[in-house]
Image (cartoon, rainbow, N blue to C red):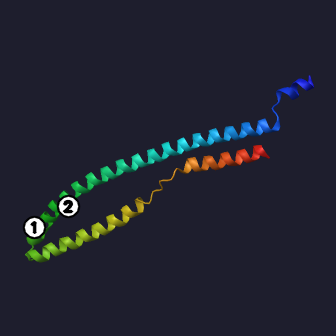
Amino acid sequence: MARERLRQQPSLPEAFSEVLSDFADLFRKELNLARAEFSSNMSAKLRGMIWLSVAGVLGLAALGLLSGAAVAWINTFEVSLHVAFMLVAAGTAVLAAVAYFAGRTEAKTELSPRRTIDQVKQDIETTKEQLT
């Protein structure tokens, strides 16, 4: 009975080969997961950039119209036309600076597949534990 169990268990080289094969298979699957995660992140970034571009174009049109209306309104207070344009331009420059700094902060999103990297690290640790 004991001899039968020993015959059924793989030898050390066979077990080591099986562990390495499983690790290689797992690593391939993790790479495929990383590719899928990266692709998903990139497509979300692309959709976001398209929507931001559309918003930017529409915002520029609205800003032009509002600026013209603001200049006309300031001009009704008997302020010369060139001073009215300068006041509106200064206000627009302040708004542009605020938007720039807000956008720069938001654009620092990380593209690397963090979940997959963490999972691969965990897999390596598990494999090391199994080999020792």
Instruction: Give the residue type at disc 1.
Output: Ala
Residue 111 placed where, x, y %?
A: 47, 53
Residue 65 placed where, x, y %?
A: 15, 60
Dot 2 surroundings within 10 Å: few (below 14), some, or many (20 or more)?
A: few
Q: Residue at x 26, y 56 (%)?
A: 56
Instruction: Give the residue type at disc 2.
Output: Leu
Taking 99 as reference, is 19 above or below it? above
Ranked by sequence position, the earlier of labels 2 and 1 is 2
Residue at image mark 2: 63
Residue 78 in the figure: left or right of residue 125: left
Taking 112 as reference, is 36 above or below it? above
The answer for how far apart the CA atoms under marks 2 and 1 are is: 14 Å
Q: Residue at x 67, y 41 (%)?
A: 23
Q: Which mark is residue 72?
A: 1
Near-viewer residue (31 or 84): 31
Residue 41 in the figure: left or right of residue 83: right
Mark in the foreground, 2 or 1: 2
